[in-house]
Amino acid sequence: MDVKTTVLENGMTVVTDRMPSLKSAALGVWVRTGSRAEAVDQNGITHLLEHMAFKGTKTRTARGIAEEIEAVGGELNASTSIEHTNYYARILAEDVPLAVDILADILQNSTFDPQELAREQHVILQEIGAANDSPEDQAFDLFQQTAWPDQAIGRPILGTPETVKGFDRNVLDAYLSDRYRAPDMVLAAAGLVDHDEIVALAREKFGGFNSESAAPEGAAKYIGGEILHNKDLMEAQVLIGFEGRPYKSPDYYAIQILASVLGGGMSSRLFQEIREKHGLCYAIYSFHWAFSDTGLFGLHAATSHEDLGALMPMIADELLAAANTISEEEVARSRAQIRAGLLMALESPAARAGQIARQILVHGRVLPPEEISSKIEAVTSADIRRVAQEIFTGTTPTLTAIGPVEGIMTARELAERLQQGPVLRTATM
């Protein structure tokens, strides 16, 4: 990696990763703000603002923005997450100045035309409706809500129909001014890029952003519990979770490997034991979401009502077994999977730009791949067993399920089963 970093006078960070063998570039602006920065009546505004950024500026129409970038074969897009928002472009190297100009324009000069706003609000209402029609999406929304009830981090990124319909131009302008501050923004570029050129462009185009950081978000407090919705569906969507670890936790890599060992692929414990050996579901996997001050370890499965009674105790037994019998061979296999994923991502300029931007926002610096690899390699099976014991038996479970869930093991019953002690079976090889 050929990474260079510069902090502008107003506090905005410019970071580049030059890939001289390419003819293209990926670049974007990452902002340290997401849905957890929203007040209750603002739920969904970050996502709406991301949509409205492409709907016209003082000098470009919505169609003009699309035509201008596509005229050079490029593309523009954006995304909103719980803690970050990003606006990005993929272009040929010679069109980097155009991409920077468009990104700067949409983030500073959007007009939020009332007609465009009304149309986009309607589009997002359809997006919310589509999510509500998906039992899996519903289950995940309830999962966040149950883990962090009555907190911004637990509310849906899309917002609700009531909040989305209530936003107007003045509210969007105020939120943009409040949350989009130079010290909380990173312009990242990877590919055939020149660092000094990107810095000069950023200084010219983004120098007008406020140089004071936005107010910090409130601390998250994991609670846990359960929400069960019995519905007439073919399958039950089941999510089980526990308090995880934040990005900067010493156990971050241990819990990532734990998620991989348990349910990170076809060789994982959950897949082999529950899907392959017993056929209780078509797919089952585990994951870990890390945030700045909290985390959530979870697993997802979909199964019939007939198999639900056997599925839940078996999952509990697998969690206990992982806390007591994970082997060095399993850890080595999962280390290799994670390391391969990191290295493969380095082949994509878009992935590299996103990676270095997020590392700046989270860690304040770019982490060399060698440093990450060494931390992954340092994790032992004993570390993972300890972390598994801490989270599976030391935190309140989060349980959400939608579908034919009558008679499902409750969160309390799951917690009691996990307190019964280790399940000693031979480690999956």
Image: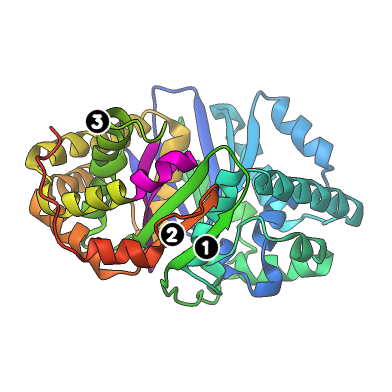
Percent position of residue 233, x then y: 60, 41
Quick check: 93 above or below 208?
Answer: above
Q: Earlier in the sequence, mark 3 or mark 1?
A: 1
**Contact check, label 3 and label 1, Cβ < 8 Å:** no
Q: Is residue 291 covered in magenta? A: yes
Residue 332 falls left or right of residue 238: left
Q: Would you say residue 394 sits in the magenta stretch?
A: no
Q: Which residue is mark 1?
A: 227
Task: Determine contact: label 1, label 2, CB under 8 Å.
Answer: yes
> For mark 2, does the 10 Å Cα neighbourhood hold few (<14), some (14 to 19), or many (20 or more) residues?
many
Residue 226 position (above or below residue 89): below
The residue at the point 34 percent across, 44 percent down is: 310
Q: In front: mark 3 or mark 2?
A: 2
| Separation of marks 1 and 2 at Cα, in angstroms | 7 Å
State the residue in front, 332 or 361: 332
| Residue 391 in view, yes or no | no
Instruction: Quickly name the residue at label 3.
Output: 267
Q: Position of residue 193 (x, y in %)?
A: 47, 35
**Earlier along the polypeptide chain: callout 1 or callout 2?**
1
Which amino acid type is shown beneath numbered disc 2? Leu
Check disc 1 and report its element: helix, strand or loop. Answer: strand
**Residue at label 2?**
399
**Residue at x-position 72% and y-position 55%:** 48
Tell me the quarter of the image containing the N terminus: top left
